[in-house]
Structure formats: structure tokens, C-alpha cells
Image: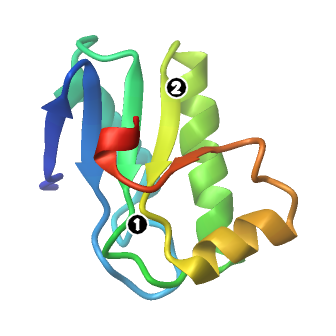
Amino acid sequence: MEIFHHFYNDIMVVDIAPGDGDFVEEDLDEFIKEIKSLNNGKAKKVALNMKNKKFLNSSGLGEMIKVKDILLDDGMELILIALAPRIESLIDMVGLNNFFTIVSTEKDI
């Protein structure tokens, strides 16, 4: 699995690929394992750049919650960057806007 990422200051930024309604097209557990491996303890914050993701269904939202919970268990904070209006609306509608840290651009981290 190839995950496109870079480090911005002390934050690991992962680019989320476009797709249907799921959060990631790959196996979610494998995706999380790969993020942890690429990070290798370097960053205490992981930011998911969502600029290419225009839609997310309820299953995808559940996957994002799982990612946040697993990273949090490992002492890492999750940040979401550049949410599409539809995704931000979904997060707000289900009352998770205080659960996730959401920023507009990488520079806002």
C-alpha cells in the first residue's frame, strides 16, 4: 500500500485519495498500520489532507472515528485538513464537530 505523506513541522500529513463514500479504499486496519509505520514515532500529530475527498458516507465517517480512536490510543492527535462542504456538513449534523480538529489549510495546523 502506498500512502502519500510528508512532514510539516512536527506533524505527519497524509493525503487522502478521492473515492466513493468510504474513507479509504484500502483495508482500514492496513491503512492505520502503515501510517504508524511511516510515522515511526516522529510526530505526535497526524493530519489527514482531505482536499481530494468530496463525499463521505456514514461508513466512511465511522472509519474516520476509528482512525482517530486508534491514533489517540497511541498518543497521537488527529487533525482533518480541507474538508469538502458536504463532509463538514455531515460531521456537524451528527454532532462530531467538537470531536475532530478541523482546519482549512496545512498552514492552519
Report crowding for label 1: few under 14, some 14 to 19, many 20 or more residues within 10 A (C-alpha).
some
Residue 53 at what x, y percent from top left? Answer: 40, 76
Residue 67 at what x, y percent from top left? Answer: 54, 43
Mark with earlier residue (2, 1): 1
- Front residue of this view, candidates 49 and 4: 49
Q: In the visual, does 87 lie left or right of 99?
A: left
Residue occupying image coordinates x 38% and y 49%: 48
Q: In the visual, does 11 lie left or right of 6?
A: right
Report crowding for label 2: few under 14, some 14 to 19, many 20 or more residues within 10 A (C-alpha).
some
Rounded to the nearest angstrom, the CA distance separating label 2 from label 1 is 19 Å
Residue occupying image coordinates x 50% and y 76%: 84
Q: Which mark is residue 33?
A: none
Residue 41 at what x, y percent from top left? Answer: 28, 11
Residue 56 makes an appearance in the image: no
Element under disc 2: strand
Task: Name the residue carrying label 2.
Answer: 77
Q: Are marks 2 and 1 in contact (CB under 8 Å)?
A: no
Residue 27 makes an appearance in the image: yes
Element under disc 1: loop
Q: Which mark is residue 24?
A: 1
- Front residue of this view, candidates 33 and 53: 53
Question: Residue 99's image quarter?
Answer: top right
Q: Quadrant of the N terminus?
A: bottom left
Residue type at tag 1: Val
Foreground tag (2 vs 1): 2
Decide: is 42 above or below 105. Answer: above
Residue 91 at what x, y percent from top left? Answer: 73, 64
Direction front: furthest residue = 108
Give the colour scheme of this rendering: rainbow
Question: Residue 86's image quarter?
Answer: bottom right
Residue type at tag 2: Glu
Residue occupying image coordinates x 30% and y 17%: 43
